[in-house]
Amino acid sequence: MLKMMLIGAVAVPAIAAGAVAATGVVVVDVQERAGGHHIVVPVPLALAQVAAAFVPENKSHVRLPAEAERYLPVAREVLTALAEAEDAELVRVEEPGQQVSIRKEGDRLHIHVDERGQQVDVQVPIRLALSVLPDQGGHITASDAVWALQHARLTQVVDVQGADGEHVKVTVY
Amino acid sequence: MRRRTLAAAAVCIPTLTMAYPARTAAQGPSAWVHVRVEERANQSKVAVNLPVSVVEAALQAAPEKVMAQGRIHLGHGGNDLSVADLRRAWNELKTTGDAEFVSVEDGDQTVRVARSGNLVLVHVEKPGGREAVRVEVPVEVVDALLSGQTEELNVRAAFAKLQNRRGDIVRVHDENATVRIWIDEGK
């Protein structure tokens, strides 16, 4: 009996950890200014998806204007063609005190913004961008959007470094 | 049976392995469309580099109607030119060979449309180099743009032809800004 309880005590957390690892975890890491708090919040994707499923349908749907909806196929075709293109800097904008760069790096789009000391880096896997594009009716649900993060496993999707030392990172494992 | 399979493999494997490099060599290096915009007043620079395949994909998926009722709006005076008129004029002009089709001196501005070899040149200039627009489009691109019988410009066909061009397509240079659009094989 004791042996069974011991096996259960080990197996249940191991299975739970395995399930969480298999479905993915989003880790939000916030480092406040020097001497401030350091907060790390791991959110299992499966849990986030379950929570998203409870959001009322009218609150979780993004409804696109008809004009934007007409161009959804263009966005889809462009992203698909980009996925097959060579790596390169696609866009670069330079203004006094501000710099924006969009690069294609492997299967990801890397957006870098440098504005007066504040640095923002966003990495979007192209498959993620494709899967969050609304459907033909212009709909996307919160649950679909969360599930799409599966395509961003092992990616630091957001990295924001404030000029005052604040640092926020969002990584999908 | 086994001998026949081996014989088939002996023929197929070298054929397939030889065919693959031949195909990739025929495809050649990919072409890129580049856009550069520099504005002196606010010291801004914009650079856009897109593979031709991406632009083509966007054009293929773009909504059919880009231009209303097949008419090109000219200026602010409400003067329109129909695609049919333009197609008729182009069919007459392109047979004349190298020539200056249009030359307009309007106040302090000179507009020149000419054909030089395989290119259609549109130059707009103001004295002292204050403003200059130079558009260079291959004849076959204009042909493709005006292909078809409908009252619409065939932008997709024109871009398909434009992919073969290497070099400048548009250069605009004025007091405040410069714009350059070109196609080459560099990223």
Image (cartoon, rainbow, N blue to C red):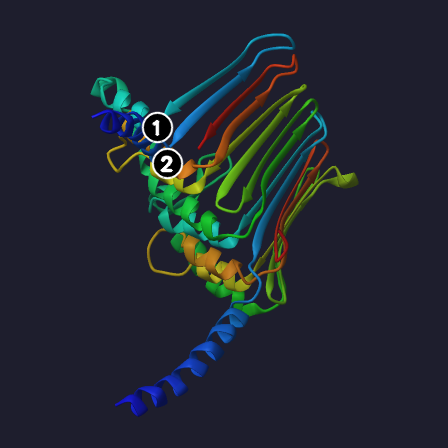
- The image position of residue B8, as x and y in percent, is 34, 87
Q: Residue at x 47, y 62 (%)?
A: B143
Marks 2 & 1, CB-CB < 8 Å contact: yes
Whether residue A112 is visible here, answered yes or no, is yes
Picture coordinates of residue B120, whole percent (x, y): 59, 59
Q: Residues within 10 Å of mark 1 (few under 14, many from 20)?
A: many
Residue type, mark 1 in image: Leu
**Observer-nearest residue: B27 or B108?**
B27
Q: Earlier in the sequence, mark 2 or mark 1?
A: 1
Label 2 belongs to which residue?
A: A150
Q: Which mark is residue A45?
A: 1
Mark 2, secondary structure of its residue: helix
Residue A112 image point, x, y percent: 59, 31
- Residue at (37%, 36%) from the top-left corner? A150
**In the rendered structure, the residue with mark 1 lies on which chain?**
A
Mark 2 burial class by Cα count in 10 Å: few <14, some 14-19, many 20+: many
Work out whether B32 lies above or below B107: below
Q: Residue A62, percent across and down?
A: 30, 25
Name the residue nearer the viewer: B95 or B147.
B147
Q: Chain of mark 2?
A: A
